[in-house]
Protein backbone atom coordinates (compact mmCIF):
# COMPACT_ATOMS: atom_id res chain seq x y z
CA UNK A 1 0.00 0.00 0.00
CA UNK A 2 2.85 2.40 0.83
CA UNK A 3 4.45 1.67 -2.52
CA UNK A 4 1.16 2.33 -4.32
CA UNK A 5 0.74 5.62 -2.46
CA UNK A 6 4.24 6.72 -3.42
CA UNK A 7 3.63 5.89 -7.07
CA UNK A 8 0.33 7.77 -7.01
CA UNK A 9 1.93 10.87 -5.51
CA UNK A 10 4.72 10.76 -8.07
CA UNK A 11 2.20 10.58 -10.89
CA UNK A 12 0.30 13.55 -9.51
CA UNK A 13 3.46 15.64 -9.25
CA UNK A 14 4.54 14.75 -12.77
CA UNK A 15 1.07 15.35 -14.15
CA UNK A 16 0.40 18.69 -12.52
CA UNK A 17 3.73 20.39 -11.80
CA UNK A 18 3.68 22.43 -14.99
CA UNK A 19 6.59 20.75 -16.76
CA UNK A 20 7.05 21.71 -20.40
CA UNK A 21 7.16 19.63 -23.54
CA UNK A 22 10.18 18.54 -25.49
CA UNK A 23 10.38 21.30 -28.11
CA UNK A 24 13.45 23.57 -27.90
CA UNK A 25 12.82 27.12 -26.71
CA UNK A 26 13.74 30.32 -28.52
CA UNK A 27 13.65 33.78 -26.92
CA UNK A 28 14.28 36.89 -29.01
CA UNK A 29 15.77 34.71 -31.72
CA UNK A 30 18.20 33.07 -29.28
CA UNK A 31 18.07 29.38 -28.47
CA UNK A 32 17.68 28.80 -24.74
CA UNK A 33 18.71 25.67 -22.88
CA UNK A 34 15.72 23.37 -22.49
CA UNK A 35 16.47 22.82 -18.80
CA UNK A 36 17.67 25.84 -16.81
CA UNK A 37 19.53 25.80 -13.49
CA UNK A 38 17.91 27.79 -10.70
CA UNK A 39 21.33 28.79 -9.37
CA UNK A 40 24.86 29.27 -10.65
CA UNK A 41 27.59 28.12 -8.27
CA UNK A 42 30.93 29.91 -8.10
CA UNK A 43 34.18 30.02 -6.15
CA UNK A 44 33.88 31.31 -2.60
CA UNK A 45 34.29 35.01 -1.89
CA UNK A 46 33.45 36.88 1.29
CA UNK A 47 30.70 39.50 1.39
CA UNK A 48 33.00 42.45 0.75
CA UNK A 49 34.55 40.62 -2.18
CA UNK A 50 31.14 39.85 -3.68
CA UNK A 51 30.04 43.47 -3.31
CA UNK A 52 33.23 44.73 -4.95
CA UNK A 53 32.88 42.36 -7.91
CA UNK A 54 29.25 43.31 -8.41
CA UNK A 55 30.11 47.00 -8.40
CA UNK A 56 32.95 46.47 -10.88
CA UNK A 57 30.51 44.64 -13.17
CA UNK A 58 28.13 47.61 -13.23
CA UNK A 59 25.62 46.41 -10.64
CA UNK A 60 24.28 48.41 -7.73
CA UNK A 61 24.41 46.58 -4.40
CA UNK A 62 21.21 47.54 -2.57
CA UNK A 63 21.63 45.54 0.63
CA UNK A 64 22.95 42.51 2.48
CA UNK A 65 21.21 40.22 4.92
CA UNK A 66 22.94 37.74 7.23
CA UNK A 67 20.90 34.61 8.00
CA UNK A 68 21.55 31.15 9.39
CA UNK A 69 22.21 30.04 5.80
CA UNK A 70 24.88 32.66 5.07
CA UNK A 71 24.60 36.20 3.73
CA UNK A 72 22.31 37.26 0.90
CA UNK A 73 23.62 40.10 -1.26
CA UNK A 74 20.93 41.98 -3.20
CA UNK A 75 21.81 43.79 -6.42
CA UNK A 76 20.25 45.44 -9.45
CA UNK A 77 21.04 47.66 -12.42
CA UNK A 78 19.16 50.07 -14.66
CA UNK A 79 18.28 47.40 -17.22
CA UNK A 80 16.86 45.00 -14.64
CA UNK A 81 14.77 47.76 -13.07
CA UNK A 82 13.46 48.93 -16.43
CA UNK A 83 12.50 45.38 -17.44
CA UNK A 84 10.61 44.80 -14.19
CA UNK A 85 8.94 48.21 -13.96
CA UNK A 86 5.57 46.80 -14.99
CA UNK A 87 2.48 45.80 -12.99
CA UNK A 88 3.15 42.70 -10.86
CA UNK A 89 6.67 42.21 -12.31
CA UNK A 90 8.82 44.13 -9.82
CA UNK A 91 10.25 41.01 -8.16
CA UNK A 92 12.47 40.49 -11.20
CA UNK A 93 14.23 43.83 -10.65
CA UNK A 94 16.62 42.60 -7.96
CA UNK A 95 19.05 39.69 -8.10
CA UNK A 96 20.34 37.60 -5.21
CA UNK A 97 23.67 35.99 -4.33
CA UNK A 98 24.19 33.76 -1.31
CA UNK A 99 27.62 33.91 0.29
CA UNK A 100 27.63 30.34 1.58
CA UNK A 101 30.26 30.17 4.30
CA UNK A 102 29.43 26.57 5.26
CA UNK A 103 29.95 25.17 1.76
CA UNK A 104 32.64 27.71 0.83
CA UNK A 105 30.93 28.84 -2.36
CA UNK A 106 28.68 31.54 -3.75
CA UNK A 107 25.28 30.73 -5.19
CA UNK A 108 23.82 33.15 -7.73
CA UNK A 109 20.07 33.16 -8.41
CA UNK A 110 20.02 32.64 -12.18
CA UNK A 111 18.44 35.73 -13.79
CA UNK A 112 17.21 33.60 -16.69
CA UNK A 113 15.44 31.10 -14.42
CA UNK A 114 13.81 33.63 -12.11
CA UNK A 115 13.37 36.19 -14.88
CA UNK A 116 11.27 33.80 -16.95
CA UNK A 117 9.28 32.72 -13.89
CA UNK A 118 8.52 36.25 -12.70
CA UNK A 119 8.21 38.10 -16.03
CA UNK A 120 6.31 35.31 -17.82
CA UNK A 121 4.99 36.64 -21.16
CA UNK A 122 6.89 39.91 -20.63
CA UNK A 123 10.22 38.19 -20.13
CA UNK A 124 13.15 39.99 -21.80
CA UNK A 125 15.78 37.39 -22.59
CA UNK A 126 18.33 39.95 -23.75
CA UNK A 127 18.28 41.68 -20.36
CA UNK A 128 18.39 38.44 -18.35
CA UNK A 129 21.14 36.94 -20.49
CA UNK A 130 23.21 40.13 -20.29
CA UNK A 131 22.91 40.11 -16.49
CA UNK A 132 24.07 36.49 -16.34
CA UNK A 133 26.97 37.19 -18.69
CA UNK A 134 28.09 40.12 -16.52
CA UNK A 135 27.92 37.92 -13.42
CA UNK A 136 29.94 35.18 -15.09
CA UNK A 137 32.57 37.71 -16.11
CA UNK A 138 32.75 39.12 -12.59
CA UNK A 139 32.83 35.84 -10.68
CA UNK A 140 34.60 33.53 -13.09
CA UNK A 141 33.29 30.14 -14.20
CA UNK A 142 29.87 29.36 -12.75
CA UNK A 143 28.49 25.83 -12.76
CA UNK A 144 24.85 24.78 -12.74
CA UNK A 145 23.21 23.85 -9.47
CA UNK A 146 21.42 20.53 -9.12
CA UNK A 147 18.17 22.54 -8.82
CA UNK A 148 16.76 22.86 -12.35
CA UNK A 149 13.49 23.21 -14.24
CA UNK A 150 12.39 23.17 -17.86
CA UNK A 151 12.57 26.69 -19.25
CA UNK A 152 9.22 26.43 -21.03
CA UNK A 153 7.48 25.49 -17.80
CA UNK A 154 8.78 28.35 -15.67
CA UNK A 155 6.23 30.96 -16.75
CA UNK A 156 3.33 28.77 -15.64
CA UNK A 157 5.09 27.06 -12.75
CA UNK A 158 3.21 25.63 -9.81
CA UNK A 159 4.26 22.83 -7.50
CA UNK A 160 1.28 20.59 -8.20
CA UNK A 161 -2.49 20.66 -8.58
CA UNK A 162 -4.12 22.94 -6.03
CA UNK A 163 -0.92 24.91 -5.40
CA UNK A 164 -0.65 28.62 -6.32
CA UNK A 165 0.80 30.20 -9.45
CA UNK A 166 3.00 33.30 -9.61
CA UNK A 167 0.08 35.68 -10.02
CA UNK A 168 -1.74 34.36 -6.93
CA UNK A 169 0.02 36.75 -4.57
CA UNK A 170 -0.69 37.57 -0.94
CA UNK A 171 -1.95 41.08 -0.27
CA UNK A 172 -0.29 41.92 3.04
CA UNK A 173 -1.12 45.61 3.28
CA UNK A 174 -3.13 48.43 1.71
CA UNK A 175 -2.73 52.19 1.65
CA UNK A 176 -0.91 54.90 -0.22
CA UNK A 177 2.44 54.12 -1.76
CA UNK A 178 4.15 56.60 0.56
CA UNK A 179 2.55 55.04 3.64
CA UNK A 180 3.43 51.46 2.67
CA UNK A 181 7.00 52.40 1.77
CA UNK A 182 7.37 54.19 5.11
CA UNK A 183 6.17 51.10 6.99
CA UNK A 184 8.67 48.93 5.13
CA UNK A 185 11.51 51.35 5.83
CA UNK A 186 10.68 51.59 9.53
CA UNK A 187 10.26 47.84 10.07
CA UNK A 188 12.95 46.16 12.14
CA UNK A 189 15.40 44.24 9.99
CA UNK A 190 14.40 45.64 6.58
CA UNK A 191 17.32 45.13 4.19
CA UNK A 192 16.38 47.40 1.29
CA UNK A 193 13.57 49.33 -0.38
CA UNK A 194 14.25 49.67 -4.11
CA UNK A 195 12.44 52.30 -6.17
CA UNK A 196 11.33 51.31 -9.67
CA UNK A 197 9.02 54.27 -10.27
CA UNK A 198 7.01 56.79 -8.24
CA UNK A 199 4.32 54.15 -7.61
CA UNK A 200 6.37 50.95 -7.63
CA UNK A 201 8.88 49.76 -5.04
CA UNK A 202 10.28 46.41 -3.94
CA UNK A 203 10.98 46.04 -0.23
CA UNK A 204 13.05 43.25 1.32
CA UNK A 205 11.81 42.70 4.83
CA UNK A 206 12.64 40.49 7.79
CA UNK A 207 10.39 37.94 9.44
CA UNK A 208 10.35 36.27 12.82
CA UNK A 209 13.46 34.19 13.48
CA UNK A 210 11.32 31.09 14.01
CA UNK A 211 9.70 31.63 10.61
CA UNK A 212 13.07 32.07 8.89
CA UNK A 213 14.20 28.73 10.31
CA UNK A 214 12.53 26.81 7.48
CA UNK A 215 15.54 27.51 5.23
CA UNK A 216 17.89 25.37 7.27
CA UNK A 217 15.27 22.64 7.49
CA UNK A 218 14.81 22.19 3.73
CA UNK A 219 18.20 23.32 2.45
CA UNK A 220 20.41 26.21 3.53
CA UNK A 221 22.21 26.07 0.18
CA UNK A 222 19.23 27.97 -1.30
CA UNK A 223 19.13 30.48 1.53
CA UNK A 224 19.06 33.52 -0.77
CA UNK A 225 15.27 33.13 -0.65
CA UNK A 226 15.63 35.38 2.42
CA UNK A 227 14.95 38.25 2.95
CA UNK A 228 11.36 38.11 1.69
CA UNK A 229 10.39 40.52 -1.08
CA UNK A 230 7.25 42.65 -1.01
CA UNK A 231 6.06 44.57 -4.06
CA UNK A 232 4.44 47.92 -3.32
CA UNK A 233 2.28 49.30 -6.12
CA UNK A 234 -1.26 50.43 -6.83
CA UNK A 235 -2.18 50.94 -3.18
CA UNK A 236 -1.16 47.44 -2.13
CA UNK A 237 1.78 45.62 -0.60
CA UNK A 238 1.95 42.22 -2.29
CA UNK A 239 4.18 39.22 -1.71
CA UNK A 240 4.61 36.05 -3.68
CA UNK A 241 2.64 33.21 -2.18
CA UNK A 242 4.98 31.38 0.17
CA UNK A 243 3.89 28.05 -1.31
CA UNK A 244 4.88 29.31 -4.76
CA UNK A 245 8.14 31.05 -3.87
CA UNK A 246 9.45 28.25 -1.67
CA UNK A 247 8.63 25.64 -4.31
CA UNK A 248 10.21 27.47 -7.24
CA UNK A 249 13.27 28.32 -5.14
CA UNK A 250 13.59 24.64 -4.18
CA UNK A 251 12.59 22.80 -7.37
CA UNK A 252 13.94 19.49 -5.99
CA UNK A 253 11.67 19.69 -2.95
CA UNK A 254 9.43 16.64 -2.54
CA UNK A 255 5.89 16.65 -1.23
CA UNK A 256 7.04 14.89 1.95
CA UNK A 257 9.71 17.56 2.50
CA UNK A 258 7.19 20.30 1.85
CA UNK A 259 4.89 18.82 4.48
CA UNK A 260 7.63 19.18 7.11
CA UNK A 261 7.21 22.98 6.82
CA UNK A 262 3.43 22.95 6.39
CA UNK A 263 2.91 25.76 8.93
CA UNK A 264 5.51 28.08 7.39
CA UNK A 265 3.44 29.68 4.57
CA UNK A 266 0.84 30.84 7.10
CA UNK A 267 3.53 32.15 9.43
CA UNK A 268 5.15 34.12 6.58
CA UNK A 269 1.85 35.76 5.68
CA UNK A 270 1.17 36.68 9.30
CA UNK A 271 4.67 38.15 9.75
CA UNK A 272 4.35 40.27 6.62
CA UNK A 273 0.91 41.55 7.56
CA UNK A 274 2.28 42.75 10.91
CA UNK A 275 4.75 44.96 9.07
CA UNK A 276 2.12 46.63 6.88
CA UNK A 277 -0.86 46.77 9.26
Image: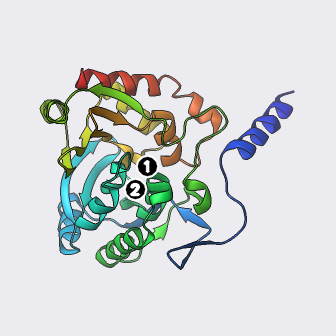
> Residue at 64% across / 31% down in the picture?
162
Q: Quadrant of the C terminus?
A: top left
Q: Is residue 80 above or below residue 275?
A: below
- For this view, does 240 lie left or right of residue 50? right
Q: Are marks 1 and 2 in contact (CB under 8 Å)?
A: no
> Residue at 28% across / 62% down in the picture?
82
Q: Element at badge 1?
A: helix
Where on the picture, by quarter, is residue 183?
top left
- For this view, does 245 lie left or right of residue 23? left
Colour scheme of the rendered structure: rainbow
What is the spatial separation of the Cα atoms under label 1 and label 2, in whole angstroms?
11 Å
Residue ID for mark 1: 222
Query: Which residue is at the front of the view, 87 or 21?
Result: 87
Residue 270 at x, y = what percent?
A: 36, 21
Q: Is residue 36 above or below residue 165?
A: below
Residue 115 at x, y = what percent?
A: 43, 59
> Residue at 67% across / 35% down in the picture?
161
For discs 1 and 2, the disc positioned in front in the rendered view: 1
Query: Which residue is at the front of the view, 165 or 12?
Result: 165
Residue 118 at x, y = what percent?
A: 44, 52
The answer to whether residue 38 of the structure is visible from this angle is: no
Numbered circle sitting on residue 103: 2
Residue 228 at x, y = what percent?
A: 33, 39
Give whichever of discs 1 and 2 has the lower sequence position.
2
Amino acid sequence: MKKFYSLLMSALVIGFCGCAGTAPEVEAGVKVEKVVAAYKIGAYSDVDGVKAKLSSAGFEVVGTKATDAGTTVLFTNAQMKAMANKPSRGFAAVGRILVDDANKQISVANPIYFGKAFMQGEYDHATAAAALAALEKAFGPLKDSADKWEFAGLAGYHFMVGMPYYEEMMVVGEGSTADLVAKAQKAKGTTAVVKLSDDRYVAFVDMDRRTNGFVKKIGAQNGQILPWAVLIEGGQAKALSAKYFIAISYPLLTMNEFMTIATVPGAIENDLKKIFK
